[in-house]
Amino acid sequence: MLKNEDKCNLKLENQLYIKPEYLIHPFISGNKYRKLKYNFLEAKTLGKTILLTFGGAYSNHISAVAAAGKEFGFRTIGVIRGEELKNTSLNPTLRFAQSCGMTLKFVTREAYKNKSDSAFISELQKEFGAFYLIPEGGTNTLAVKGCEEILTKADAKFDFICCPVGTGGTISGLINSALSHQKIIGFPALKGDFLQEEITKFAKNKNWELITDYHFGGYAKISDELIAFMNQFKCKHTIPLDPVYTGKMMFGIYNLIDKGYFPKQSKILAIHTGGLQGVEGMNQKLKQQNRPLIV
């Protein structure tokens, strides 16, 4: 689909490295590129010209599908949670998606809960025609297949692989492709334990653990402490983090290192899954709240 899929890992500290997946593509970056790769190829094989997917107002997935659709010649439909949003100014994420040619369909939060129901999908097909359906967050069997390609032979030296977790597709791919001596550590962006069940649908091995202490309240929640950490991290390493996924993961990794969670001689690889498009929208919210901004 694209070139330059494998980026060299960057050393941060003595035992900590980062895989900069966000550098794969300026708009279809990180795990979104990995998740969409085989889905787009399948859509082409099936002769589909329309892609339909779901997401919230600040969704990295919506942004990536819109950009990929524009680049590879698909018409894209984004079903957006929150009917009230159609009467307001579009935020940076939705403006970008629309600029890429994505048609935005706003539905009520109650209706959005039916996004997996056949009757709801049938109504969307009547409205938009025969589309290729990509689930919310992009996670399906083909997405997991793409995420299995994140780790390369050069990553065999690492003992721990860390990644943020949203819908569970990325960590499932890492679990499946990890070597026997490697442990996968997931940092969920959401509260709750439902992800365990989602991951086991796709993951073949038991070499993983979710650490649920670093969600900071959920997807759209962020503290001034986390903002300060992200800004200091970027200043020191010139690597930007996003407030929903990678910022929380990196905060968690450093905190666990301080607590002695990782054995001293172990090598840790953190997967930077992208999500940087969400920084502008978060900063708009922070500015309205007179809080520190993400640099």
Image (cartoon, rainbow, N blue to C red):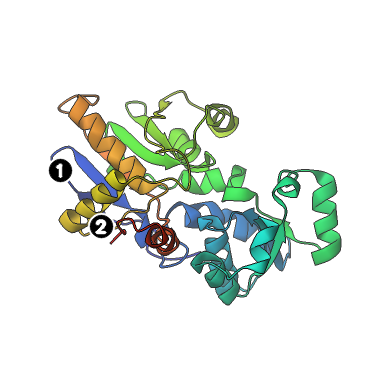
Please state the horizontal and vertical placement of residue 34, each as a whole percent of the image: 49, 53
Identified by mark 2, the residue type is Ile
Badge 1: residue crowd in 10 Å (few <14, some 14–19, many ≥20): few
> Any mark on residue 239, and which?
2
Q: How many marks?
A: 2
Crowd band around label 2 with a 10 angstrom C-alpha radius: few (<14), some (14–19), many (20+): some
Q: Earlier in the sequence, mark 1 or mark 2?
A: 1
Q: Position of residue 56 (x, y in %)?
A: 59, 54
In the displayed structure, 16 sits above or below 232; it is above
Q: Nearer the viewer, residue 125 or 241?
A: 241
- For label 1, the residue is 13
**Residue 74 location (% of width, % of height):** 65, 70
Image coords of residue 103 (percent x, y)? 68, 70
Q: Which mark is residue 108?
A: none
The reply, left or right, for residue 243 in relation to residue 49 is left
Q: What kind of residue is marked 1? A: Glu
Residue at x-position 73% and y-position 65%: 47
State left or right for residue 116 relative to residue 149.
Answer: right
Q: Is residue 22 left or right of residue 144?
A: left
User: Is residue 76 visible from the viewing direction of this image?
Assistant: no
Q: Could you tell me which residue is drawn at 47 percent across and 48 percent down?
A: 220
Q: Quadrant of the C terminus?
A: bottom left
- Along the viewing direction, whichever of 244 and 69 lies nearer the viewer: 244
Q: Are marks 1 and 2 in contact (CB under 8 Å)?
A: no
Q: What is the distance, in whole Å, between disc 1 and disc 2 at their CAs?
A: 13 Å
Kindly identify the residue that appears in the image at 41 percent across and 34 percent down: 186
